[in-house]
Amino acid sequence: MRQEALVRDNYECQECKRQGRVHVDSLKQPGERKSIQLNVHHRKEIEHHPELAMELDNLETLCLSHHNKIHGRVFKPHVQKWNDEMW
């Protein structure tokens, strides 16, 4: 199902596409591990809708950034509270 969703969505993040941007999957380099750039997301969560777990219409390709935002896993950059002088 994951592969079918990726093929259907042309290996592009659908949320980026809605915003007029393009985020495609990374390419596998020979001898190196492929970095994960895209996830297949369940629009209706399996926890609440287990009957839709294997439905292609419930799947959507998202980049890691948008997938994390949807699930509330947004990490803010570290900001110093004050700027100490170095002596």
Image (tube, rainbow, N blue to C red):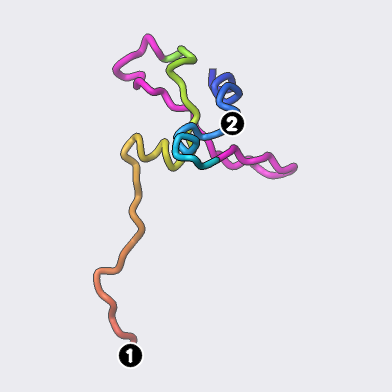
Q: How far across and how far down the image is residue 51, in percent?
A: 37, 9
Position of residue 18 in the picture relative to residue 25 (left or right): left
Q: Say which amino acid is labelled 2.
A: Tyr
Mark 2 residue crowding within 10 angstroms, few (<14) / some (14–19) / many (20+): many
Image point (48%, 32%), residue name: 14
Position of residue 48 in the picture relative to residue 54 (left or right): left
Hey, which residue is sitting farthest right in the picture?
30
Q: Work out whether 75 lies above or below 68.
A: below
Tag on residue 11?
A: 2
Please tell me whether mark 2 sits on a helix, a strand or a loop: loop
Image point (60%, 28%), residue name: 10
Q: Work out whether 56 lies above or below 41.
A: above
Image point (54%, 40%), residue name: 23
Q: Say which amino acid is labelled 1.
A: Trp
Tag on residue 14?
A: none
Q: How far across and how far down the image is residue 69, in percent?
A: 36, 40
Hey, which residue is sitting farthest front in the picture?
20
Q: Work out whether 57 lies above or below 33.
A: above
Q: Which residues lie in the magenta part?
A: 23-52
Please tell me whether mark 1 sits on a helix, a strand or a loop: loop
Report if residue 28 lies within the magenta region.
yes
Position of residue 49 in the picture relative to residue 63 (left or right): left
Disc 2 from disc 1: Cα separation: 52 Å
The C terminus - image quarter: bottom left
Q: Nearer the viewer, residue 32 or 41?
A: 41
The residue under label 1 is 87
Mark 1 residue crowding within 10 angstroms, few (<14) / some (14–19) / many (20+): few
